[in-house]
Amino acid sequence: METYGCQMNFSDSEIVASILFDKGYFSTEEITQADIIFINTCSIRDNAEQRVKKRLQQFRSYKKRNPALIIGLLGCMADRIKTVLLEEEQLLDVISGPDSYRDLPRLLEQVESGQPGVNTLLSMEETYADITPVRLGSNGISAFISIMRGCENYCSYCVVPSTRGRERSRETGSIIHEAQDLFSRGYREITLLGQNVNSYRWTEEEEEVNFAKLLIRIARIDSLLRIRFATSHPKDISDELLEAIAAHPNICKSIHLPVQSGSSRVLELMNRKYSREQYMERVDAIRRIIPGCAISTDIITGFCNEAEEDHRETLSLMEWIGFDYAFMFNYSERPQTLAAETLDDNIPQEVKERRLKEVIDLQQKLSYQRNSEDLHQVFEVLVEGESKRSGDQFMGRNSQNKVVVFPKKRSKPGDYVRVKIHQCTSATLLGKIID
Ligand code: SAH
Ligand code: SF4
Ligand code: F3S
């Protein structure tokens, strides 16, 4: 199985693996040995889809060598291009959307009887709450837990509401149980996933559990279990949530708060439901309630009608906030979105690219500045494993989600160590364990 796209998709691949392992299938690292190849796909930008299509062409050669090979496409591209892919390409045997993974064993049986297996129906209820994911490629320390599915925010540029359907929360008890189980198996860090975790809501025994309450319940499992979460929508990140983060040392001091643009005019066109000023007010609240909290973001450049002045407002907002980290993208028009239907994708490619470069260059400078502020400070770091560059060094993260690299010195993965920082780049902190 290969996975493209976001953390939610990665988490879904672990659910798919669990469903198939239960039916007696097992996985292989060697693709040429596989009888079935699944590719879990992403539609978020055009280049994400192009990568998947290229990969499918490579699968074609495997199928020539082994005509019995079954190829399945899962995830966010499934519904959008099922007819094209089935009829024109004649490569795929199985197509399954994000809510129909329980149906995969039946779809595979259908293939054995000579018919392609297709199910891309979206559901109002499916949360896979009872399925224990098989941890794929895990370091044994950090794991994802999906707490909700779908999205109903309808940002005008975004395909997710149409690929993943209605927003629904997963039952609280099953989330707590999964977290407890991971902790007892040695995991020390979990990341709760949803497109907008702030709107998590589950009612049980007349009590409503919102996201802040869910976080507190998980934080109480054990002080050695770290909790992260993504993604927070700026329009509904509440003080109650910020206070819960501040009050629990094991809830990490790092918030991913995608801003998308620094211009209120563009934010309105994007249907983000907050203004530049409202975003700044939330950042002030984070700084006031959780001192030392890292803030990361997502930015789209060259959205429809974005004037040079709007772009400069994005740059000035970035400077004002001093984001620790950012994911930055050129706008890519997606079919069946509000923007594709009602707005003109009118910023020339070279202007989009120049603006993106300015945003990336500025962020690089800001990340370096933020990391420099950490010099000579001591952080508690959860050891994840060996650093990529050297077998003598470990890598881990601090509460602010920054990667820290340091000499091993009697520590092992899963330990918490105190590291004093003596050097940094824009991406990494370097330090030494202190006793
Ligand atoms: N639910 C999350 C984001 C999910 S998609 C949120 O609301 O923040 C991850 C990021 O991809 C988005 O934050 C956005 O910056 C980017 N993105 C989404 N659609 C895009 C598009 N059509 N073109 C370019 N970037 C896009
Ligand atoms: Fe897309 Fe907006 Fe939903 Fe995020 S909140 S997934 S950007 S529609
Ligand atoms: Fe994720 Fe891509 Fe789908 S970002 S939700 S896999 S469109």
Image: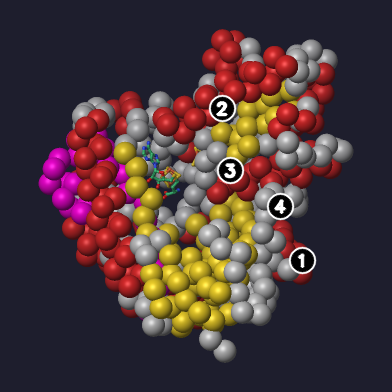
Query: In the figure, 245 relative to 39: above or below?
Result: below
Q: Quadrant of residue 192?
A: bottom right
Q: Residue furthest right?
A: 24
Relative to 209, say whether 27 is above or below. above
- Residue 343 x, y percent position in the rendering: 26, 29
For this orientation, the residue located farthest to the bottom is 435
Looking at the image, tell me whether mark 3 or mark 2 is earlier in sequence order. Answer: 3
Q: Which mark is residue 135?
A: 4
Contact, mark 1 vs mark 3 (Cβ under 8 Å) = no
Q: Residue 312 colored magenta?
A: yes
Mark 3 lies on residue? 9
**Distance from the alpha carbon under mark 2 to that under mark 1:** 35 Å
Q: Which amino acid is tagged 4?
A: Arg
Does residue 349 belong to the magenta stretch?
no
What residue is at 52 percent from the left and 41 percent from the top? 5
Q: Earlier in the sequence, mark 2 or mark 1?
A: 2
Q: CA distance from mark 4 to mark 2?
A: 24 Å
Q: How is the image coloured?
A: secondary structure
Tell me the distance, in whole angstroms, between the alpha carbons under discs 1 and 3: 23 Å
Three-letter amino acid code at the position of disc 1 = Arg
The answer to whether residue 330 of the structure is visible from this angle is: yes
| Closer to us: 308 or 157 | 308
- Marks 3 and 4, the one that precedes in the sequence: 3
Query: Residue 427 in the image: x percent, y percent?
Result: 40, 61
Q: Position of residue 336 (x, y in %)?
A: 41, 27
Q: In terms of sequence position, does the residue under pointer 1 or pointer 4 come before the other?
A: 4
Q: Which mark is residue 55?
A: 2
Specify whether tag 3 is near ligand 3 (CB below 8 Å).
yes
Q: Which residue is mark 1?
A: 185
